[in-house]
Amino acid sequence: MTPPASEPRATVPGEAPLAAAPPLELQRAQAARLLAAWKIPTGWRYWSAVNNTVVGLWYVVLTLVFFLFGGVLALVMRLQLAAPGNTVVSADHYNQIFTLHGSVMMFLFAIPIFEAVSIMFLPQMLGTRELPFPRLSAFGFWAFAIGGTFLCGSLFFDAAPRGGWFMYPPLTSRFQPDIGADIWLLGFSFIEVAAIAAAVELIVGVLRCRPPGMRLNLMPLYAWYVLVAAFMVLFAFPPLIVGTAMLELERAFGWPFFDPRGGGDPLLWQHLFWIFGHPEVYIIFLPSVALIAMIVPTAARRPLIGYSWVVLAAIGTGFLSFGLWVHHMFTTGLPGITLALFSAASSAVAIPTAVQFVCFFATLLAGAIARTVPMLYVVGGFATFVIGGLTGVMVAMAPFNFQAHDTYFVVAHLHTVLIGGAVFPLLAGLYYYFPLVNGRLLSDRLGRVSFWLVFVGFNATFMPMHVAGLLGMPRRVFTYPAGLGLEWWNLVSTVGAFILAAGFAVVLWDVLRPSRSKSPSPRNPWNAGTLEWLQEMPGQPWGVRTIPEIDARYPLWQQPNFVRDYDEGRFYLPDAEEGRREMLVTSTLDAVPVQCMRIPGPSFITLVAAVFVGGIFIFPTFKLYTAMAVSAVFATGTIVVWLWTGTGEIPAVPTKHVGLGVTLPLYVSGRDAVGWWAMCITMLAVFAAFLSLVFGYFFYWSLRADFLPQPSPGPGVAWPVAGAGLITLAWALTALARRWNRQNVASACCTGLLVASLLAGAGVAALIEGPSRTALDPAASVYAATVWLLVAWTGIQVVLGIVMQWYCVARRVAGRMTAQHDMDLANVVLYWHFTGVTALLTVAVVAGAPLVA
Amino acid sequence: MPSAVTVSRERLWLPVVAPVVWSTHFMLCYTVAALACGRFAEVLPAARVRGLLVVLTAAAVTVMVWCLHDGWNRLGSRWPRRAHDDDTPHDRQHFMAFTTVLLASLSLLATAFEAAALWAVDRCT
């Protein structure tokens, strides 16, 4: 492979010698201009901020609030279970509490904390100024805040979901007709959309916004883990979103996806849920291990041993974790072959997990360990996680699993894995990274006290649960009779839970006590080697003073005079002459700079958009479908305004000198643009969701000989094929329109797009006409419901594509898109590639499958 | 002239070919099992299922071995004597090659492990 082609510019980046330090007055003037450009708004406008440090902080604080809420629920449960026949809460309240505890901890703490921490620190770790789409981060946060509050609030109206955090039908469809399950299904769908948005942001951030010279082999391990976890979010969440949509359609309109009376099958829910649910464990675990991978080299005062092996472990775990989902379903009567396959895969995932631990231990043994509070939590997490991993191998064995299924043994196992694998590392990260938040250190003494309380409390809570489970105590029971030998184990667990809570209370006090009483942190207090510790104490809103040139994995240790050069602003973009927020976009593998990108500043539009998008999910909970439609229209309008005013700005001059002799374009379109990447990655997630639907179709088909009604009253062949043909024409015309635009024939481009939108509209009508003509009733059979869902999915995607075509016409007419500046159209064409393929597949399934059968 | 991004994108996906083959093999095994123990029990008796799984596994292993071989070739004679932590395109390529080798090995291991389990348990009940 050839080295990256050099752009027609003066020098190859990284080879130009650093310029002499600018005079002191200039340095001060540069810093002042940067501060003005990156200023965090004050007063009530503070809430319009989009700086990653601010949004990240809100995000982290809110996830911790939800964590405390979930913890309090756990204490209530432990009180109820402290003695047999207790009456602290009623059975119904207990059901609401354990459902919310699991759901809150998983969806409102464990997953979002990874995205929150990454939004807060990833740019600093990469030595860049921001994530590529700051307003998207803010939108994600507001969506999370609205959805999370809605969910938790339901408990105070006695309306919380009661079906357990995995919501198995038919319990949650036929037997719980109240609003609780709807709140769960729609609320979490909303939050999952926000989670996918954050994942897109993080992937593009890691792949395209690294500082010049930070090739893939020099990237901080945290970035590798985040990359893997974000890709996992992309493929794990869509099946759940599809599953929740199906369950909600069954609950609201009687489409019998999971109801055997209409030919459905509740097992499909379990498949879709756990295809999400098992990777999710690793989505939680990997970013927490990533914190360990940052703390261990610092504590050992040497580079991590086995960098490539840890990368292997992260990627390998990411893949293998998608092959484990059936081990949650071992007792559902699946064939022996299937059990063997998943049992083997569940054991195999221990290999990459062990590899990374070996690397961490090797690094610690080879270095001189600093006995800091973060290390205490790291070591505590190691021990706990390894125990959880071993019980994990036990439950991966099908015969043992049959015995332990749905007992407290599983409860003990999952808490050991998640608390050892995620909560301990997060507490380590809290003590390690706290100085970056406000320039103060947390107390060493309180840290040690909290560690021992947490460690002892944790073990006292969960070790007895293993025994209680083996003695036969089922999970999710609100009480148990005396005389079964369970009393003492439960009492010890309850006492342990309160010791654990005391540990968290100490941490909370340490964090919340006034800043004055905390000692100020020196710069780089742990003598770390990674980029985030370049930060001044306390930090400035600009992210980095200047975007450095990277030559090593631990620049602070390995690059001579690095901090001095950085402070003097001798690298890239040390100034903001035009008063704009600017950052560098670089190439994927070798981080060669390709663009100086201007990103938008503070805005309330993200909050407005989140409110209206929230309406789309919250109104149908109360069966307010008109309000939902109105909210959808407003949401679309808000997002169009957001895009129109905040993106695709044509710069006054085409290029900018960014320092070190490098001049970069300010506007980039097509495959080199970050927007194109974000569209591509988002559409991968949308496509994964669509494939989950197709999986559902063939799942029913493989299960039942009578899935396809004979003689077929399906959608026929003519109408669906006509629909696919029209949509394909629209797709081709959209692609041609981009070519005509490039040739600067504006009239052809606009006409092409308008005709394409008409063809697309006709295509959707034809698609709908198929099942309408044959009067397929989606409430009557699962076959009809699945066909309608596939058609509706494609239809919605095409209609959004039509809005995008109109948007491009408007941009062209308004002069905001030109022959050279066509990123909007390039991204829309990419959207249409995915949409076209989706339409063809839909028709192949709904019209083709009955023919083949 | 292609841009820097386009040139350097060409092999970003190479290290993950083997794990993708692992996923495909895994899903096909799952599908075969589901069909053989479901609607198609008559068409797919145990002996035929075993033959099918052997063919699938052989195909997957072939691709993974090719990935391993390709990565090994690109690695040259430098492994395992030095870490690839220099800021050169060469070290970055070396890192990618090494990651290819490691991921192909892990995929082979996982596939072999699963195939062994399938060989031992080929019953539907």
Image: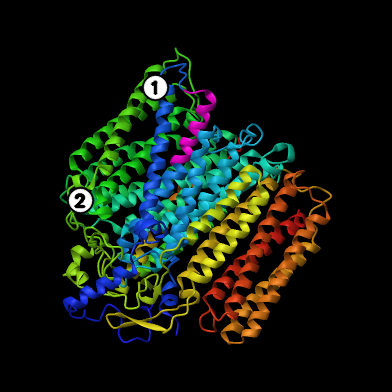
Q: Nearer the viewer, residue A733 or A624?
A: A624
The residue pinned by badge 2 equals: A299
Residue A287 placement, left or right of A767 = left
For disc 2, the neighbor class at 10 Å (few under 14, some 14 to 19, many from 20) is many
Which of A595/A352 is in front? A595
Q: Which mark is residue A490?
A: 1
Taking the magenta stretch, the answer to whether it contains residue A99 is yes
Where does the magenta region start and end?
A: A89-105
State the image coordinates of residue A193 (x, y, percent, origin top left): 52, 54
The answer to whether residue A701 is visible is yes
Residue that extends furthest to the front in the rendered view of this protein: A43
Determine if the magenta segment contains residue A300: no
Query: What kind of residue is marked 2?
Result: Ala
What kind of element bears circle 2?
Answer: helix
SS assignment at label 1: helix
Label whose residue precedes the other's in the sequence (1 or 2):
2
Q: Nearer the viewer, residue B75 or A7?
A: A7
* x and y, in percent, of residue A680 in the image: 52, 66
Q: What main secondary structure does the magenta stretch of the protein show?
A: helix
The chain letter for the residue carrying disc 1 is A
In the image: residue A141, left or right of residue A37: right
**Residue beneath the point at 44% across and 78% down:** A667
Total of numbered circles in the picture? 2
The image quarter containing residue A181 is top right
Identify the residue at horizontal 40%, vertical 70% (top origin).
A588
